[in-house]
């Protein structure tokens, strides 16, 4: 029996890439049950493009065109709620599936009956589609229970898997994307998802993730972005209840490394751009977030590495 796999695509002013995204889904070797395209009030001609696909593929492509901009998280949550299949996965409007994505991931799930989530390797591509790197870099990420790795962001380069294929029942258990999130809505959702369900990893790269500097994370001030990261950490602390102390310790330690890496990177970016005051302000604000005080306890080195010594602060929190 052919599985009923729903794919939802969310887009906002991504017309230059959107056709590639839609084509990559409808041309899968395992035909999707439905392709949901939710456009967040684009003004670049995306809406007309989406309606053209809906008219050419009736019964397959379902178009939702918002009259006002909802934001990334609300648009993704909206798309999730439209799903009618037994399985679902997603794609951003500027990314692409490789042809065997649905077929291979579903096959991996069939071989791992305890898993309700399949995730795979992916390529990072530039604006014109050239492959820059492979996410896993040849080292296979884990299968099974991966909640500690997801919450603690302990994958390579602190980045997470993308476009996972999950059972519809997962949404009934963990809910939808948090509509109040400005950034990191995927991380927040994956934390909840992997706390309750097992995964299977598919080692073949099956998605192409496009990086071109147009995302909200690239436009948001460093301190605001760090605040969003910390909000996700704090929001999900209750999920640590009942876990062994050693596992909680590992999650907090890995997350402290992630936060320190991210803070150092954003501060160095400001310093490299000649925004010395901005770099110092970012450091001060981040310490404020962690300690609730304006006391800066570390020596600040704006040039080069900025040591923040956060591990003990996270563990204490």
Image (cartoon, rainbow, N blue to C red):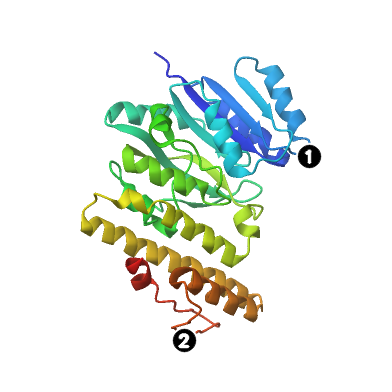
User: Which of marks 2 and 1 precedes in the sequence?
Assistant: 1
**Residue that label 2 marks:** 299
- What is the quadrant of residue 199 in the picture? top left
Single out the residue that lies furthest toward the bottom: 299
Tell me what residue is drawn at x 38 percent, y 50 percent: 150
The x, y position of residue 26, in whole percent, is: 58, 25
Q: Is residue 280 left or right of residue 260?
A: right
Circle 1 packing at 10 Å, graded few (<14), some (14-19), many (20+), is: few
Is residue 180 shown to the viewer in this render?
A: yes
Percent of width and height locating residue 137: 41, 53
CA separation in Å, label 1 and label 2 = 48 Å
Q: Nearer the viewer, residue 209 or 160?
A: 160
Q: Position of residue 18 (x, y in %)?
A: 67, 36
Q: Who is closer to the viewer here, 267 or 175? A: 175
User: What label does residue 131 carry, if any?
Assistant: none
* Dot 2 alpha-carbon crowd within 10 angstroms: few under 14, some 14 to 19, many 20 or more: few
Q: Nearer the viewer, residue 161 or 292?
A: 292
Q: Is residue 26 above or below residue 145?
A: above
Q: Quadrant of residue 86?
A: top left
Quick one: SS at disc 1?
loop
Q: Pick out the residue farthest to the front.
A: 292
Left or right relative to 220: residue 251: left
Q: Residue at x 48, y 76 (%)?
A: 293
Residue 274 horizontal side relative to residue 148, left or right: right
Q: Which residue is mark 1?
A: 43
Residue at the spot x=63%, y=81% of the render? 276
Residue 19 drawn above or below residue 248? above
Marks 1 and 2 in Cβ contact (< 8 Å): no
Q: How many marks?
A: 2
User: x%, y% of residue 129?
Assistant: 62, 46
């Amino acid at each position: 029996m052919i599985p009923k796999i729903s794919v939802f695509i969310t887009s906002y002013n991504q017309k230059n890439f959107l056709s590639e995204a839609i084509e990559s889904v409808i041309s899968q070797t395992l035909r999707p049950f439905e392709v949901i395209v939710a456009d967040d009030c684009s003004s670049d001609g995306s809406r007309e493009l989406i309606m053209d696909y809906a008219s050419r593929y009736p019964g397959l492509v379902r178009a939702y065109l918002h009259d006002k901009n909802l934001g990334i998280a609300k648009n993704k949550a909206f798309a999730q709620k439209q799903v009618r299949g037994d399985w679902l996965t997603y794609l951003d409007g500027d990314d692409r599936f490789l042809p065997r994505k649905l077929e291979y991931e579903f096959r991996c799930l069939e071989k791992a009956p305890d898993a309700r989530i399949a995730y795979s390797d992916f390529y990072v591509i530039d604006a014109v589609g050239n492959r820059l790197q492979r996410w896993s870099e040849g080292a296979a990420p884990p299968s099974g229970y991966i909640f500690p790795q997801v919450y603690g962001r302990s994958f390579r380069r602190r980045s997470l898997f993308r476009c996972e294929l999950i059972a519809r029942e997962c949404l009934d258990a963990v809910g939808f994307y948090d509509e109040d999130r400005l950034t990191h809505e995927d991380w927040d959702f994956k934390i909840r998802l992997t706390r309750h369900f097992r995964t299977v990893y598919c080692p073949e790269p099956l998605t192409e993730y496009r990086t071109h500097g147009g995302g909200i994370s690239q436009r948001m001030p460093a301190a605001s972005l760090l605040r969003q990261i910390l909000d996700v950490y704090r929001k999900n602390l209750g999920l640590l209840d009942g876990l062994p102390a050693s596992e909680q310790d590992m999650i907090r330690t890995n997350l402290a490394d992630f936060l320190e890496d991210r803070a150092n990177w954003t501060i160095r970016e400001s310093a490299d751009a000649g925004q010395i005051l901005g770099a110092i302000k970012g450091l001060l604000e981040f310490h404020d977030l962690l300690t609730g005080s304006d006391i800066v306890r570390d020596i600040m080195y704006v040039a080069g590495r900025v040591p923040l010594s956060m591990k003990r602060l996270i563990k204490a929190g």
